Image (spheres, rainbow, N blue to C red):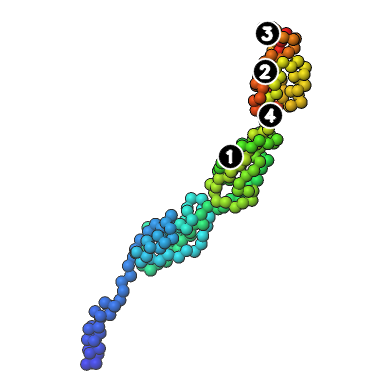
């Protein structure tokens, strides 16, 4: 009996000590770590006794590279300290393959770039026999891998240009032959008797001689009656 009483007494004396060594489990609410950088999310969880584990990564058009897309448990849930919060991290936007724009009309090229998330960079004009507005060169080249929003520079044809010949004083028939040979078209021929001159002589032309105009431009003439 004495032994039992001694055992109980020792147990009662040790109970406060054992109680002090027993750790109390604290409950905390999970914070929202979405859209935070990985190191920021890790610190936010660590500050309240939680841990971060990156379980996967995904491309995202809205969440920047190395930022948290989603988490589990969700924010606001009550968990024990020491709980691991699992998260998916962003790889950033998915890269884009630059399409081939060479040979396409400029307006078509604009539409293509817009549809796939690229933008138009500097545009350079160049005289070329290709139809006006044709894309001649591009940078980056077709097939290049670029991030969304990357600008694509283009060189675009503005057609070919020629110098307007001097037709004043020529007979209209000779003027027509020369214009046809040079690739010009006659827009209109007016006759006038204001000035004296040989019948059918070119008295006036527009555009004026020596001007640089696009090949195939129209010429307006005024000839004597």
35 versus 15 height, above or below: above
**Earlier residue among tags 2 and 1:** 1
**Earlier residue among tags 1 and 3:** 1
Q: Quadrant of the N terminus?
A: bottom left
Badge 4 crowding class, 10 Å Cα cut-off, few under 14, some 14 to 19, many 20 or more, is: some
- Report, in whole angstroms, how far the alpha carbon at label 2 lies from the one at label 3: 15 Å
Depth-wise, is mark 1 or mark 3 nearer the camera?
Answer: 3
**Earlier residue among tags 4 and 2:** 4
Which image quarter: residue 155? top right
Residue designated by label 1: 123
**Earlier residue among tags 2 and 3:** 3
Tell whether 196 sits left or right of 94. Answer: right
Badge 2 crowding class, 10 Å Cα cut-off, few under 14, some 14 to 19, many 20 or more, is: some
Query: Could you tell me which secondary element the residue under label 4 belongs to?
Result: strand
**Earlier residue among tags 1 and 4:** 1
Residue designated by label 3: 195
Q: Is residue 90 visible?
A: yes
Depth-wise, is mark 2 or mark 1 nearer the camera?
Answer: 2
- Report, in whole angstroms, how far the alpha carbon at label 4 lies from the one at label 2: 16 Å
Residue designated by label 2: 205
């Amino acid at each position: 009996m004495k032994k039992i009483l001694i055992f109980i007494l020792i147990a009662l004396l040790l109970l406060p000590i054992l109680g002090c060594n027993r750790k109390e489990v604290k409950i905390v609410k999970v914070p929202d770590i979405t859209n935070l950088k990985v190191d920021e999310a890790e610190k936010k969880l660590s500050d309240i006794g939680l841990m971060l584990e990156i379980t996967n990564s995904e491309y995202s058009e809205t969440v920047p590279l190395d930022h948290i897309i989603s988490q589990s448990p969700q924010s606001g849930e009550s968990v024990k300290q020491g709980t691991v919060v699992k998260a998916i991290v962003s790889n950033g936007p998915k890269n884009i393959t630059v399409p081939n724009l060479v040979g396409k009309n400029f307006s078509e090229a604009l539409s293509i770039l817009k549809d796939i998330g690229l933008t138009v960079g500097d545009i350079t004009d160049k005289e070329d026999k290709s139809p006006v507005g044709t894309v001649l060169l591009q940078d980056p080249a077709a097939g290049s891998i670029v991030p969304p929003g990357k600008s694509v520079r283009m060189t675009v044809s503005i057609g070919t240009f020629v110098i307007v010949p001097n037709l004043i004083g020529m007979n209209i028939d000779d003027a027509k032959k020369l214009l046809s040979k040079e690739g010009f078209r006659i827009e209109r021929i007016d006759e006038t008797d204001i000035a004296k001159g040989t019948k059918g002589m070119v008295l006036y032309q527009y555009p004026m001689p020596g001007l640089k105009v696009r090949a195939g431009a129209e010429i307006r003439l005024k000839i004597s009656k």
